[in-house]
Image (cartoon, helix red, strand yellow):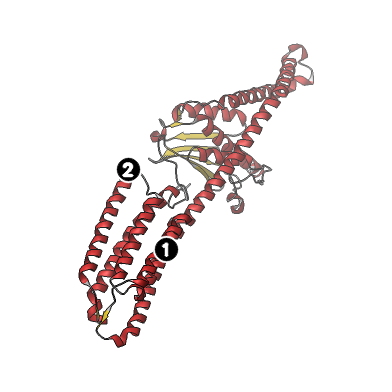
Protein backbone atom coordinates (compact mmCIF):
# COMPACT_ATOMS: atom_id res chain seq x y z
CA UNK A 1 0.00 0.00 0.00
CA UNK A 2 1.64 3.24 -0.91
CA UNK A 3 1.77 6.04 1.60
CA UNK A 4 3.86 7.52 4.35
CA UNK A 5 4.90 5.19 7.12
CA UNK A 6 3.73 6.32 10.56
CA UNK A 7 7.29 6.89 11.84
CA UNK A 8 8.03 9.24 8.87
CA UNK A 9 5.11 11.54 9.69
CA UNK A 10 7.30 13.96 11.68
CA UNK A 11 9.82 14.23 8.84
CA UNK A 12 7.05 15.03 6.34
CA UNK A 13 5.66 17.67 8.71
CA UNK A 14 9.04 19.36 9.16
CA UNK A 15 9.65 19.37 5.40
CA UNK A 16 6.29 20.99 4.73
CA UNK A 17 6.84 23.55 7.47
CA UNK A 18 10.10 24.47 5.76
CA UNK A 19 8.46 24.92 2.36
CA UNK A 20 5.58 26.86 3.87
CA UNK A 21 8.01 29.21 5.62
CA UNK A 22 9.77 29.91 2.32
CA UNK A 23 6.39 30.70 0.74
CA UNK A 24 5.47 33.05 3.59
CA UNK A 25 8.81 34.80 3.36
CA UNK A 26 8.25 35.35 -0.36
CA UNK A 27 4.78 36.76 0.32
CA UNK A 28 6.07 39.03 3.09
CA UNK A 29 8.84 40.34 0.84
CA UNK A 30 6.31 41.07 -1.91
CA UNK A 31 4.09 43.01 0.54
CA UNK A 32 7.09 44.90 1.88
CA UNK A 33 8.08 46.02 -1.62
CA UNK A 34 4.59 46.92 -2.86
CA UNK A 35 2.81 48.10 0.28
CA UNK A 36 3.80 51.77 0.08
CA UNK A 37 3.41 52.13 -3.68
CA UNK A 38 0.10 50.25 -3.89
CA UNK A 39 -1.64 50.98 -0.59
CA UNK A 40 0.15 54.12 0.56
CA UNK A 41 1.33 52.53 3.81
CA UNK A 42 4.77 53.49 5.11
CA UNK A 43 6.48 50.57 6.89
CA UNK A 44 9.58 50.49 9.14
CA UNK A 45 11.81 48.73 6.61
CA UNK A 46 14.94 48.31 8.71
CA UNK A 47 13.53 46.15 11.57
CA UNK A 48 11.35 44.20 9.13
CA UNK A 49 14.33 43.39 6.93
CA UNK A 50 16.19 42.16 10.00
CA UNK A 51 13.24 39.94 10.90
CA UNK A 52 13.00 38.53 7.36
CA UNK A 53 16.74 37.81 7.35
CA UNK A 54 16.48 36.04 10.71
CA UNK A 55 13.62 33.89 9.42
CA UNK A 56 15.58 33.03 6.29
CA UNK A 57 18.64 32.02 8.34
CA UNK A 58 16.47 29.91 10.61
CA UNK A 59 14.89 28.19 7.61
CA UNK A 60 18.33 27.44 6.19
CA UNK A 61 19.19 25.72 9.48
CA UNK A 62 15.89 23.82 9.13
CA UNK A 63 16.98 22.61 5.68
CA UNK A 64 20.28 21.47 7.20
CA UNK A 65 18.34 19.71 9.94
CA UNK A 66 16.26 17.88 7.33
CA UNK A 67 19.45 16.68 5.62
CA UNK A 68 20.79 15.53 8.99
CA UNK A 69 17.65 13.50 9.68
CA UNK A 70 17.89 11.97 6.22
CA UNK A 71 21.53 10.97 6.65
CA UNK A 72 20.99 9.46 10.11
CA UNK A 73 17.60 7.90 9.29
CA UNK A 74 15.92 9.69 12.19
CA UNK A 75 12.73 11.71 12.52
CA UNK A 76 11.99 15.02 14.27
CA UNK A 77 10.51 14.75 17.73
CA UNK A 78 7.34 16.53 18.82
CA UNK A 79 9.49 18.93 20.85
CA UNK A 80 11.47 19.87 17.74
CA UNK A 81 8.30 20.52 15.77
CA UNK A 82 6.93 22.59 18.63
CA UNK A 83 10.13 24.67 18.68
CA UNK A 84 9.62 25.32 14.96
CA UNK A 85 6.09 26.53 15.60
CA UNK A 86 7.19 28.76 18.49
CA UNK A 87 9.76 30.42 16.22
CA UNK A 88 7.06 31.04 13.59
CA UNK A 89 4.62 32.51 16.14
CA UNK A 90 7.37 34.69 17.60
CA UNK A 91 8.37 35.96 14.14
CA UNK A 92 4.72 36.71 13.33
CA UNK A 93 4.33 38.61 16.61
CA UNK A 94 7.46 40.67 15.93
CA UNK A 95 6.29 41.56 12.42
CA UNK A 96 2.85 42.51 13.72
CA UNK A 97 4.46 44.67 16.43
CA UNK A 98 6.09 46.85 13.75
CA UNK A 99 2.99 46.88 11.51
CA UNK A 100 0.11 48.02 13.68
CA UNK A 101 -0.18 45.27 16.27
CA UNK A 102 -3.71 44.06 16.89
CA UNK A 103 -5.05 46.62 14.39
CA UNK A 104 -3.28 44.80 11.54
CA UNK A 105 -5.81 42.61 9.66
CA UNK A 106 -3.17 39.88 9.44
CA UNK A 107 -3.29 39.41 13.22
CA UNK A 108 -5.63 36.45 12.69
CA UNK A 109 -2.67 34.66 11.07
CA UNK A 110 -2.24 33.10 14.51
CA UNK A 111 -5.17 30.80 13.72
CA UNK A 112 -3.68 29.01 10.65
CA UNK A 113 -0.52 28.46 12.66
CA UNK A 114 -2.49 26.85 15.47
CA UNK A 115 -4.46 24.78 12.94
CA UNK A 116 -1.18 23.47 11.54
CA UNK A 117 0.07 22.73 15.05
CA UNK A 118 -3.10 20.79 15.87
CA UNK A 119 -2.52 18.61 12.81
CA UNK A 120 1.05 17.61 13.68
CA UNK A 121 1.39 17.85 17.48
CA UNK A 122 -0.23 16.22 20.54
CA UNK A 123 -2.92 18.21 22.31
CA UNK A 124 -0.71 19.25 25.24
CA UNK A 125 1.77 20.94 22.87
CA UNK A 126 -1.07 22.56 20.94
CA UNK A 127 -2.52 23.89 24.20
CA UNK A 128 0.83 25.41 25.14
CA UNK A 129 1.15 27.03 21.71
CA UNK A 130 -2.42 28.37 21.96
CA UNK A 131 -1.60 30.01 25.30
CA UNK A 132 1.58 31.45 23.83
CA UNK A 133 -0.30 32.85 20.83
CA UNK A 134 -2.95 34.33 23.16
CA UNK A 135 -0.25 36.02 25.24
CA UNK A 136 1.37 37.50 22.12
CA UNK A 137 -1.99 38.75 20.83
CA UNK A 138 -2.77 40.31 24.21
CA UNK A 139 0.56 42.14 24.29
CA UNK A 140 -0.08 43.45 20.79
CA UNK A 141 -3.28 45.04 22.10
CA UNK A 142 -1.21 47.07 24.54
CA UNK A 143 1.97 47.94 22.70
CA UNK A 144 2.81 48.21 19.02
CA UNK A 145 4.15 50.57 16.35
CA UNK A 146 1.18 52.21 14.58
CA UNK A 147 0.95 52.11 10.81
CA UNK A 148 1.58 55.37 8.97
CA UNK A 149 -0.99 55.88 6.22
CA UNK A 150 -0.51 58.50 3.51
CA UNK A 151 -4.28 58.88 3.37
CA UNK A 152 -5.93 58.01 6.73
CA UNK A 153 -9.38 58.38 5.18
CA UNK A 154 -8.81 55.05 3.35
CA UNK A 155 -8.00 53.16 6.55
CA UNK A 156 -11.26 51.16 6.48
CA UNK A 157 -10.76 50.17 2.85
CA UNK A 158 -7.17 49.16 3.54
CA UNK A 159 -8.31 47.12 6.51
CA UNK A 160 -10.97 45.31 4.46
CA UNK A 161 -8.47 44.61 1.67
CA UNK A 162 -6.02 43.28 4.25
CA UNK A 163 -8.70 41.01 5.72
CA UNK A 164 -9.42 39.66 2.25
CA UNK A 165 -5.73 38.95 1.64
CA UNK A 166 -5.51 37.39 5.07
CA UNK A 167 -8.43 35.11 4.31
CA UNK A 168 -6.93 34.02 0.98
CA UNK A 169 -3.53 33.30 2.53
CA UNK A 170 -5.08 31.44 5.47
CA UNK A 171 -7.25 29.33 3.17
CA UNK A 172 -4.26 28.44 1.01
CA UNK A 173 -2.18 27.50 4.05
CA UNK A 174 -4.89 25.31 5.52
CA UNK A 175 -5.71 23.68 2.18
CA UNK A 176 -2.05 23.02 1.39
CA UNK A 177 -0.78 21.96 4.80
CA UNK A 178 -3.59 20.73 7.01
CA UNK A 179 -5.50 18.96 4.24
CA UNK A 180 -2.32 17.27 2.98
CA UNK A 181 -1.40 16.17 6.49
CA UNK A 182 -4.91 14.83 7.02
CA UNK A 183 -4.42 12.77 3.87
CA UNK A 184 -1.17 11.40 5.30
CA UNK A 185 -2.97 10.49 8.51
CA UNK A 186 -5.71 8.72 6.55
CA UNK A 187 -3.04 6.76 4.65
CA UNK A 188 -1.43 5.83 7.94
CA UNK A 189 -4.75 4.64 9.36
CA UNK A 190 -5.32 2.59 6.20
CA UNK A 191 -1.89 0.99 6.61
CA UNK A 192 -2.63 0.17 10.25
CA UNK A 193 -5.97 -1.37 9.30
CA UNK A 194 -4.27 -3.41 6.60
CA UNK A 195 -1.68 -4.60 9.13
CA UNK A 196 -4.46 -5.62 11.54
CA UNK A 197 -6.24 -7.55 8.79
CA UNK A 198 -2.98 -9.24 7.84
CA UNK A 199 -2.38 -10.19 11.48
CA UNK A 200 -5.91 -11.56 11.74
CA UNK A 201 -5.44 -13.64 8.57
CA UNK A 202 -2.17 -15.01 9.87
CA UNK A 203 -3.77 -15.84 13.21
CA UNK A 204 -6.57 -17.73 11.46
CA UNK A 205 -4.05 -19.53 9.27
CA UNK A 206 -1.99 -20.44 12.33
CA UNK A 207 -5.11 -21.80 14.01
CA UNK A 208 -5.88 -23.91 10.92
CA UNK A 209 -2.30 -25.19 10.89
CA UNK A 210 -2.59 -26.17 14.55
CA UNK A 211 -5.82 -28.01 13.79
CA UNK A 212 -4.13 -29.76 10.89
CA UNK A 213 -1.30 -30.87 13.18
CA UNK A 214 -3.82 -32.21 15.70
CA UNK A 215 -5.73 -34.07 12.98
CA UNK A 216 -2.48 -35.50 11.63
CA UNK A 217 -1.70 -36.86 15.08
CA UNK A 218 -5.16 -38.38 15.43
CA UNK A 219 -5.24 -40.14 12.06
CA UNK A 220 -1.83 -41.76 12.50
CA UNK A 221 -3.29 -44.82 14.24
CA UNK A 222 -6.16 -45.39 11.74
CA UNK A 223 -3.68 -45.16 8.88
CA UNK A 224 -1.44 -47.75 10.52
CA UNK A 225 -4.42 -50.07 10.93
CA UNK A 226 -5.43 -49.63 7.30
CA UNK A 227 -1.86 -50.30 6.21
CA UNK A 228 -1.84 -53.62 8.08
CA UNK A 229 -5.18 -54.67 6.57
CA UNK A 230 -4.10 -53.63 3.08
CA UNK A 231 -0.87 -55.59 3.47
CA UNK A 232 -2.72 -58.71 4.52
CA UNK A 233 -5.17 -58.39 1.62
CA UNK A 234 -2.32 -57.85 -0.85
CA UNK A 235 -0.58 -60.92 0.58
CA UNK A 236 -3.70 -63.01 0.16
CA UNK A 237 -4.19 -61.74 -3.41
CA UNK A 238 -0.62 -62.58 -4.38
CA UNK A 239 -0.73 -66.06 -2.76
CA UNK A 240 -0.58 -68.69 -5.52
CA UNK A 241 -2.81 -70.96 -3.49
CA UNK A 242 -5.57 -68.37 -3.75
CA UNK A 243 -5.16 -67.77 -7.45
CA UNK A 244 -8.64 -69.01 -8.22
CA UNK A 245 -10.37 -66.87 -5.59
CA UNK A 246 -11.93 -63.46 -6.42
CA UNK A 247 -9.45 -61.66 -4.12
CA UNK A 248 -6.67 -62.25 -6.68
CA UNK A 249 -8.43 -59.92 -9.14
CA UNK A 250 -7.88 -56.99 -6.77
CA UNK A 251 -4.10 -57.39 -6.48
CA UNK A 252 -3.34 -54.13 -8.46
CA UNK A 253 -5.84 -52.24 -6.32
CA UNK A 254 -4.29 -53.53 -3.12
CA UNK A 255 -0.83 -52.46 -4.29
CA UNK A 256 -2.17 -48.99 -5.13
CA UNK A 257 -3.84 -48.81 -1.73
CA UNK A 258 -0.57 -49.66 0.02
CA UNK A 259 1.26 -47.09 -2.07
CA UNK A 260 -1.24 -44.39 -1.14
CA UNK A 261 -1.10 -45.32 2.54
CA UNK A 262 2.70 -45.11 2.43
CA UNK A 263 2.33 -41.70 0.84
CA UNK A 264 -0.02 -40.61 3.63
CA UNK A 265 2.49 -41.73 6.26
CA UNK A 266 5.27 -39.86 4.49
CA UNK A 267 3.10 -36.72 4.36
CA UNK A 268 2.48 -36.96 8.11
CA UNK A 269 6.19 -37.45 8.71
CA UNK A 270 6.95 -34.43 6.54
CA UNK A 271 4.33 -32.39 8.41
CA UNK A 272 6.14 -33.11 11.67
CA UNK A 273 9.47 -32.29 10.04
CA UNK A 274 8.16 -29.06 8.47
CA UNK A 275 7.48 -27.63 11.92
CA UNK A 276 11.26 -27.43 12.31
CA UNK A 277 13.03 -24.72 10.27
CA UNK A 278 14.87 -26.11 7.24
CA UNK A 279 17.63 -24.59 5.17
CA UNK A 280 16.53 -23.21 1.76
CA UNK A 281 17.05 -25.52 -1.21
CA UNK A 282 18.01 -24.58 -4.79
CA UNK A 283 15.13 -24.99 -7.20
CA UNK A 284 16.97 -27.45 -9.44
CA UNK A 285 17.52 -29.72 -6.43
CA UNK A 286 14.03 -29.39 -5.03
CA UNK A 287 11.84 -29.57 -8.16
CA UNK A 288 12.23 -33.19 -9.32
CA UNK A 289 11.49 -34.82 -5.90
CA UNK A 290 8.54 -32.50 -5.43
CA UNK A 291 7.02 -33.41 -8.82
CA UNK A 292 7.56 -37.11 -8.10
CA UNK A 293 5.82 -36.88 -4.71
CA UNK A 294 2.88 -34.98 -6.16
CA UNK A 295 2.56 -37.46 -9.05
CA UNK A 296 2.27 -40.29 -6.53
CA UNK A 297 -0.67 -38.47 -4.96
CA UNK A 298 -2.41 -38.19 -8.34
CA UNK A 299 -1.43 -41.21 -10.46
CA UNK A 300 -4.25 -40.50 -12.92
CA UNK A 301 -3.04 -36.95 -13.61
CA UNK A 302 -0.11 -35.85 -15.74
CA UNK A 303 2.20 -33.02 -14.71
CA UNK A 304 4.83 -31.35 -16.86
CA UNK A 305 7.32 -28.98 -15.23
CA UNK A 306 9.82 -26.53 -16.68
CA UNK A 307 12.52 -24.60 -14.86
CA UNK A 308 14.12 -21.57 -16.51
CA UNK A 309 17.93 -21.46 -16.32
CA UNK A 310 17.94 -18.06 -14.61
CA UNK A 311 15.84 -19.49 -11.76
CA UNK A 312 17.50 -22.90 -11.39
CA UNK A 313 19.97 -21.95 -8.66
CA UNK A 314 17.64 -19.69 -6.69
CA UNK A 315 17.06 -20.97 -3.11
CA UNK A 316 13.51 -21.37 -1.82
CA UNK A 317 11.80 -22.32 1.42
CA UNK A 318 11.15 -25.92 0.40
CA UNK A 319 8.50 -26.62 3.05
CA UNK A 320 6.29 -23.61 2.39
CA UNK A 321 6.71 -23.54 -1.37
CA UNK A 322 5.88 -27.27 -1.51
CA UNK A 323 2.78 -26.62 0.60
CA UNK A 324 1.60 -23.79 -1.64
CA UNK A 325 2.22 -25.57 -4.94
CA UNK A 326 0.70 -28.83 -3.68
CA UNK A 327 -2.54 -26.97 -2.90
CA UNK A 328 -2.53 -25.23 -6.29
CA UNK A 329 -1.81 -28.43 -8.20
CA UNK A 330 -4.43 -30.38 -6.23
CA UNK A 331 -7.05 -27.77 -7.11
CA UNK A 332 -5.92 -27.75 -10.75
CA UNK A 333 -6.18 -31.54 -10.93
CA UNK A 334 -9.69 -31.50 -9.44
CA UNK A 335 -10.77 -28.73 -11.81
CA UNK A 336 -9.46 -30.67 -14.79
CA UNK A 337 -10.95 -33.93 -13.52
CA UNK A 338 -14.36 -32.23 -13.34
CA UNK A 339 -14.05 -31.65 -17.11
CA UNK A 340 -12.87 -35.19 -17.76
CA UNK A 341 -16.30 -36.46 -18.77
CA UNK A 342 -16.19 -34.20 -21.82
CA UNK A 343 -12.48 -34.75 -22.53
CA UNK A 344 -11.21 -38.22 -23.39
CA UNK A 345 -7.59 -37.22 -23.01
CA UNK A 346 -7.10 -34.27 -20.70
CA UNK A 347 -4.02 -32.13 -21.42
CA UNK A 348 -1.28 -32.36 -18.77
CA UNK A 349 -1.04 -29.87 -15.96
CA UNK A 350 1.89 -27.49 -16.24
CA UNK A 351 4.22 -26.04 -13.64
CA UNK A 352 6.44 -23.33 -15.15
CA UNK A 353 9.08 -21.64 -12.98
CA UNK A 354 10.79 -18.49 -14.22
CA UNK A 355 12.63 -15.48 -12.83
CA UNK A 356 12.48 -11.85 -13.88
CA UNK A 357 15.39 -10.39 -11.93
CA UNK A 358 13.15 -9.29 -9.06
CA UNK A 359 10.97 -12.28 -8.29
CA UNK A 360 10.40 -15.98 -8.89
CA UNK A 361 7.19 -16.88 -10.73
CA UNK A 362 5.50 -20.26 -10.34
CA UNK A 363 2.68 -20.67 -12.88
CA UNK A 364 0.30 -23.63 -12.45
CA UNK A 365 -1.84 -24.08 -15.58
CA UNK A 366 -4.87 -26.32 -15.96
CA UNK A 367 -7.51 -26.79 -18.66
CA UNK A 368 -10.50 -27.06 -16.38
CA UNK A 369 -13.69 -25.08 -16.26
CA UNK A 370 -12.09 -21.88 -14.97
CA UNK A 371 -12.98 -19.78 -11.93
CA UNK A 372 -16.00 -17.46 -11.85
CA UNK A 373 -14.89 -13.82 -11.46
CA UNK A 374 -16.97 -13.35 -8.31
CA UNK A 375 -15.30 -16.35 -6.68
CA UNK A 376 -11.81 -15.44 -7.91
CA UNK A 377 -11.84 -12.16 -5.97
CA UNK A 378 -12.42 -14.07 -2.71
CA UNK A 379 -9.92 -16.88 -3.21
CA UNK A 380 -7.17 -16.84 -0.63
CA UNK A 381 -8.76 -14.03 1.38
CA UNK A 382 -11.18 -16.24 3.32
CA UNK A 383 -12.36 -19.86 3.21
CA UNK A 384 -15.04 -19.98 0.50
CA UNK A 385 -16.92 -22.91 -1.01
CA UNK A 386 -15.87 -23.80 -4.57
CA UNK A 387 -17.81 -25.33 -7.43
CA UNK A 388 -15.94 -28.62 -6.91
CA UNK A 389 -17.07 -29.13 -3.33
CA UNK A 390 -14.02 -27.64 -1.60
CA UNK A 391 -14.19 -25.06 1.17
CA UNK A 392 -11.27 -22.89 0.07
CA UNK A 393 -9.26 -23.57 3.24
CA UNK A 394 -6.27 -24.82 1.25
CA UNK A 395 -6.09 -21.66 -0.86
CA UNK A 396 -6.52 -19.54 2.28
CA UNK A 397 -3.52 -21.28 3.84
CA UNK A 398 -1.58 -21.00 0.58
CA UNK A 399 -2.18 -17.23 0.36
CA UNK A 400 -1.16 -16.81 3.99
CA UNK A 401 2.05 -18.77 3.43
CA UNK A 402 2.82 -16.74 0.29
CA UNK A 403 2.41 -13.46 2.18
CA UNK A 404 4.65 -14.69 4.97
CA UNK A 405 7.29 -15.30 2.30
CA UNK A 406 6.82 -11.74 0.99
CA UNK A 407 4.90 -12.75 -2.14
CA UNK A 408 1.32 -13.30 -3.25
CA UNK A 409 -1.05 -15.53 -5.17
CA UNK A 410 -3.28 -14.52 -8.08
CA UNK A 411 -5.49 -16.29 -10.60
CA UNK A 412 -6.01 -15.51 -14.29
CA UNK A 413 -7.92 -17.01 -17.17
CA UNK A 414 -5.86 -19.01 -19.66
CA UNK A 415 -6.22 -18.16 -23.33
CA UNK A 416 -6.87 -21.79 -24.29
CA UNK A 417 -9.36 -22.31 -21.45
CA UNK A 418 -8.80 -23.10 -17.81
CA UNK A 419 -6.92 -21.15 -15.16
CA UNK A 420 -3.38 -20.02 -14.41
CA UNK A 421 -2.54 -19.79 -10.71
CA UNK A 422 0.47 -17.52 -10.31
CA UNK A 423 2.70 -17.56 -7.24
CA UNK A 424 5.25 -14.75 -7.08
CA UNK A 425 7.99 -14.74 -4.46
CA UNK A 426 10.86 -12.29 -3.94
CA UNK A 427 14.38 -13.47 -4.65
CA UNK A 428 16.49 -14.44 -1.66
CA UNK A 429 17.51 -11.34 0.27
CA UNK A 430 15.15 -9.04 -1.66
CA UNK A 431 12.41 -6.88 -0.18
CA UNK A 432 8.82 -8.21 -0.11
CA UNK A 433 6.93 -7.69 -3.34
CA UNK A 434 4.24 -5.06 -3.78
CA UNK A 435 1.93 -6.93 -6.12
CA UNK A 436 -1.17 -4.94 -6.82
CA UNK A 437 -1.35 -6.21 -10.39
CA UNK A 438 1.03 -8.99 -11.42
CA UNK A 439 2.66 -8.43 -14.76
CA UNK A 440 2.27 -12.01 -15.94
CA UNK A 441 0.18 -12.84 -18.97
CA UNK A 442 -0.44 -16.57 -19.53
- Residue 204 coordinates in the image, percent (x, y): 62, 40
Q: Would residue 18 be found to the left or right of residue 378 on screen?
A: left
Res. 72 mark: 2
Identify the residue at image location x=61%, y=53%: 374
The one of 156 and 235 positioned closer to us in this rendering: 156
- Residue 183 coordinates in the image, percent (x, y): 45, 59
Q: Would residue 426 be found to the left or right of residue 148 on screen?
A: right
Q: Which residue is mark 1?
A: 114
Closer to the eye: label 2 or 1: 1
Q: Earlier in the sequence, mark 2 or mark 1?
A: 2
Q: Residue furthest front?
A: 142
- Residue 108 coordinates in the image, percent (x, y): 39, 71
Distance of mark 2 from mark 1, alpha carbons? 30 Å
Which secondary structure, mark 1? helix
Q: Quadrant of residue 391?
A: top right
Taking 53 as reference, is 64 above or below it? above
Identify the residue at image location x=44%, y=55%: 125
Q: Residue furthest bottom?
A: 153
Amino acid sequence: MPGVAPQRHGLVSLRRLCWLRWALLAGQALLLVSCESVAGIHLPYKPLLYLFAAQAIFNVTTVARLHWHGQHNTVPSDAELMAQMIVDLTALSAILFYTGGATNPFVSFYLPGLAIASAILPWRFVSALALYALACYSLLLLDYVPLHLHNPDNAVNYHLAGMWLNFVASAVMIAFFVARLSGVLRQRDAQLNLAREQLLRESRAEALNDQAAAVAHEIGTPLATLAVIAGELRGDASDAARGTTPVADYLPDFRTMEQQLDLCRSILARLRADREPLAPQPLDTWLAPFVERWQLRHPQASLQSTLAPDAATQPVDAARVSQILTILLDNAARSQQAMGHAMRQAPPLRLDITGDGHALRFAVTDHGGGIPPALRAQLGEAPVASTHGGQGIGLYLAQSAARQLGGSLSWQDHRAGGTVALLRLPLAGAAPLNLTSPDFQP
